[in-house]
Image (spheres, coloured by chain):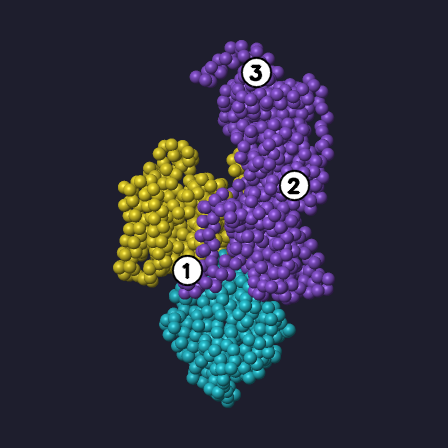
Chain colours: A purple, B cyan, C yellow
Amino acid sequence: MSASPRLQLSPAWVKALPLIGIALLAVAPLLLPEFTVTLLNYIGLYAIVAMGLVLLTGVGGLTSFGQAAFVGLGAYTTATLTTTYGVSPWLTLLVGLALTALVALALGFITLRLSGHYLPLGTIAWGISLYYLFGNVEFLGGHTGISGIPTLGVFGFELHSGREFFYLIWLAVLGVVVLTRNLLDSRSGRAIRALKGGSLMAEAMGVNTPRAKIVIFTVAALYACLSGWLYAHLQRFVNPTPFSLTQGIEYLFMAVIGGVAHVWGALLGAGLITILKQWLQDWLPQLLGQSGNFEIIFFGLMMIFILHRSRDGLWPILLRFVPQAPAAQRVTTVGQPLARRPVVERGQELLSVREATKRFGGLVANNQMSLDVRAGEVVALIGPNGAGKSTLFNGISGVDPLTSGEITFRGERVERLPSREIARRGMSRTFQHVRLLSGMSVLDNVAIGAHLRGDRGYLPAALHLERDEEARLLTEAAYQIERCGLAEHLNDAAGSLPLGKQRIVEIARALAADPCLLLLDEPAAGLRYFEKQALAELLRRLRDEGIGVLLVEHDMDFVMGLADRVVVMEFGEKLAEGLPEDVQRNPAVLEAYLGGVE
Amino acid sequence: MSSPSFASTRLAVLSLALVSLSAFADINVGVSVSATGPAASLGIPEKNTIALLPKTIGGQKVNYIVLDDATDTTSAVKNMRKLVAEDKVDVVIGSTTAPNSLAMTDIAAESETPLISLAGSAIIVEPVDAKRHWVFKTAQNDAHMATAIVEHMLNNKVQTVAFIGFADAYGEGWFKEFAKIAEARKIRIVASERFQRNDTSVTGQALKIIAAKPDAVLIGAAGTPAVLPQKTLKEKGFKGFVYQTHGVANSEFLRIGGKDVEGALLPVGPLVVAAQLPDSAPSKKVALDFITRYETAYGKGTVSAFGGHAWDAGLLLGAAIPQALKKAQPGTREFRSALRDALEGVKNLPAAHGVFNLNAQDHQGFDQRARVMARIEGGTWKLVK
Amino acid sequence: MDLQIALLLGQDGITNGAIYALLSLALVLVFTVTRVIFIPQGEFVAFGALTLASLQTGVLPGTLWLLIGLGAVAGLIDTVFALRDRQLQRIPRILGINLALPLALAGLLANIPLSSLGLPIQVLLTLAVVVPLGPLIYRLVFQPIAEASVLVLLIVAVSVHVTLTGLGLFFFGAEGSRTPSFTDASFEIGDAMIQGQTLLVVAASLTLIVALYLFFERTLWGKALRATAMNRTGARLMGISATMAGKLSFSVAALIGAFSGILISPITTIYYDSGFLIGLKGFVGAIVGGLGSYPLAAAGAVMVGLLESYSSFWASAFKEVIVFTLIIPVLVWRSLTTRHTEEEE
């Protein structure tokens, strides 16, 4: 970070910043000129919407251009109900939120199935549809709009002026900030953050990713609705134009420019764009001597520039002036140990794979593979590259289901279950290509593994009513990290570790699920000699505890010293199976391996 | 037909200008028009006209603070708040469209600042209630114009009519007004269609209209997009009357429309056909004066009806400000209140689009002298006698 | 609705659909080659139409200044890179293409009687102004982030769209333009008149589609683009540079866009912001084709044209609602049928 140290704030200041911020907000309307207060009001309104986008796009990786439509939903609900039916504005907020939740659930149910780039295109589509719908519905005032929306009253006190409204708006902003931050710093928050890093891993750890997606989609919509409700009562007039796709695009611009992965980025972006827009509208026409949408040209270019130079927006740049947050996630309160799964008796069958076949189009990756794993044994799956070992792993763990065949896990057929259901039954795995969330701490990454051992949902998380469970989860995660010998890396970003250690983090994560069967995909790759020995020692201990281990590995010394049985695959089929020493002497195996080397 | 009271107003203005002492502060006039966005073709001439408004009224220097609201209500409100709070304006002119004007109304009332809208919808000033107390408007009500069309239809034995208009506030406002008046006069509306400003085709709507076999079609659209429906109707063989609204009265419409819009009938303010009006018409002189000034500044053939609304707003101020100056200092609440009263009291003021006669119930103030029927002939507007 | 109306609506739908089809092909091309969802495609339609209109009134179009400006920036950047890499021999070519050519074009346009030239020459000049904007935008905006995710590229594309719309207003003003018909011929079929221009649109679209097909099948460049679309890394190994392919695909997209604009500007009035919705409708077509299949994309686009035409007959106020709501089931169908593997980013 190139910022000069002179500019850095001391930690004490950093701690005091939020308080200073709140104090400044409290006195702002008393000191600032009226129009500045007006601008701050709009900034607050926009920031609430942008905050939803931070959750949705920055954290969850789902891009939406359609948030303005939800703002419209909130605004129109209150406008219609208060003007036509004289309903209290506070009641209409609830109605609006309920209605928005319904619409968001319905839209989300359809559009969140859209993968990758289809989702943003889908949001453009319904953004346009809803906009035209607002304009064409008679009881919503048509294109002309609804005027005469009443002011808000708080305990009999009418919020007439912008200065009075300011407090309500910024209270809402702070509320949304707190909710968002709480939500992200929780079991559910880790589930949400896992979305962007790969739903595959999250699912394998037991996270219901479609549910996580629909939750953040709905939360973002509710934020937008709240903003719309405030907008309607501040403006006291609504018509369709502020809820058009153009505005939806602008909300996304705000979030991206500010820093789409940061809660404060939303605020920064909303502030920057609102003020710049005002400023540009004043100055550019004078400079160019002509009227035009110059500010939009400017914002477009600015977006392009930011996405070229600093894809995370401006907030991370500002953060350079602040010392690294003093490892916020350190486990401070030690929670009660989590409940453990009943131990399976040693020697009992855990996993039985029968005639597993997997085809990719015409290519047969697994053909009639069968194998068993019992509690308290280490089974190694070996074979040349491309033999179909990882494909089989994906089939067993439900990540990429088999084309045909049977998989029985602890006496239950699981080949048609999604991976999170298989995980729930006590199977946990690591990945050949490490799937960690590189920006998140090792502790948080491992805690994702313990996802299924907690049950507090999104709402308690947003309100931080689940601190007790959270402490227990983190304690468990810290214990597994220590057990795997990574205690000193607890708070490091996972991405900063060498690849070998990242593999160990994956094992710790798998262990945090309290599994009875562990699937390890090349756990020793990239480890040094002593690290391999430590890993072997750990696996032996796990075996002695009665856990079954199925591992894919290329390092023959490691495998032969550890495994109780070895299964050899070639071309998707089983070549040999038996004790390590028998397999090593099997001529077919020697042939395959020597042939593979040639 | 220069009325005596008009002459006296003029005299009053003149004498006040001569004798006034510059002890007062400058008068600040805020302007918010839609110079960009969908209503830009209306807003740009309005903005251009503001630059031609008098720099002194009643001996006082007048500052115009012009903002663009990009046809967006949020910006309109933001502009209004800025003008009121930051620039401490005495009066605001704007905005171009009905939704924007409606959105600004609350702040006008809240800050007790007179607002002179340039938009067409009557609901901006009707009924005059506590909020509209502060709102005036210079553009003819859509009802004024719709009445002219309905009269022309009745005179030409039109019994059934189809409507096609913008899917926005303009089209919606026109349909409502027109339908009300037409039905009262027993003209049947057999089809009502909508299209978007930048649609590339209106064939579907045109075919539906033709299938309904109306005697006439009214196109409720503003500016050059109004060409497309007429062109398509003609192509698809519609032979009846085609009526346009005054929203098309600019030279761009004629340029784009070419021979496709020949024969279109439309109600316009006197400004559009000023040169063809009899000398007795009250608006003729004012309108010609405005046209000369505008075209001197922006080139020949550039004038449009919308600039006229802004000009008329200037005329209203020219008549009302001297009255208000007698009562209070610019920049004060009293002045704004006095200005509002003075605006409400303007009588027999000939303007580019008609003659203003305002009162406590009518904050628009035009009568039937504010519109004439015109026909597009030979690529220009011809007065229909 | 009688048969005649149904036929007329069908004809109208096909005319618009033909334009959407052209655009959808360009979108598919750009997406498969560069992974950019080319939202600004529509702006090229508007720029094509409005540039031609301005040439016909004898005014130098604003797009010309944009061309010179972008050329200068691109030339400057490439020169700096060439200096840094000590490849001085490349500089004359860089400056020649990015600076000298646009300036020469400007010089030419300023010195010939634009409005009295024949239509074909005006069309060629329009293309000469608008088409190079495509590769220049690729060079300046997308090439530096060619490896970014589809979502980032999409957001950048939206930013480019917004910028170009703003510039369009600045260059051409709020009023639209309509260019004179290429042909005034019209044919009577039954009671209905069919304008020569609409037939021309369909015919020209078909011709262009065939030309594109030949381009992809028969020419080296076309084959290079196809190779890149199928396998970027493979194509690079074969010596086809991703940059070249990107610029080429943007050139083709700009050509198709500008040409579409020129085709429809006699039928309808084109505004600086008309392109967006036209482009989006082409998009719906492209999405029907899964952003990958040319024939499906074209068929989808024609379907959108027809849907639009019939819905403007039945419920004109809800036309856009109908067209854009119907994308959603298509999207769902698409994302269910597209195999979605581990590449989630």
Question: CB of mark 3 within 8 Å of CB of mark 2?
Answer: no
- What is the crowding at mark 1: few (fewer than 14 residues within 10 Å), some, or many (at least 20)? some
Depth check, front residue: A535 or A352: A535
| Chain to which mark 2 belongs | A
Question: Who's the residue at 49% across and 66% down the image?
Answer: B67
> SS of the residue at dot 1?
helix
Q: Are marks 2 and 1 on the same chain?
A: no
Labels 3 and 2 in the same subunit? yes
- The amino acid beneath tag 1 is Phe
| Residue closer to the observer: A503 or A345 | A503
What label does residue C82 carry, if any? none
Where is mark 2, residue-wise? A186
Q: Position of residue C241 (x, y in %)?
A: 37, 37
Task: Determine which residue is flagged by label 3.
Answer: A560
Position in image of residue C3 (x %, y %): 49, 53
- Front residue (pair B276, B285): B285
List the residue tagged with mark 1: C170
Left or right of A386? Residue A74 is right
- Say which amino acid is labelled 3: Met
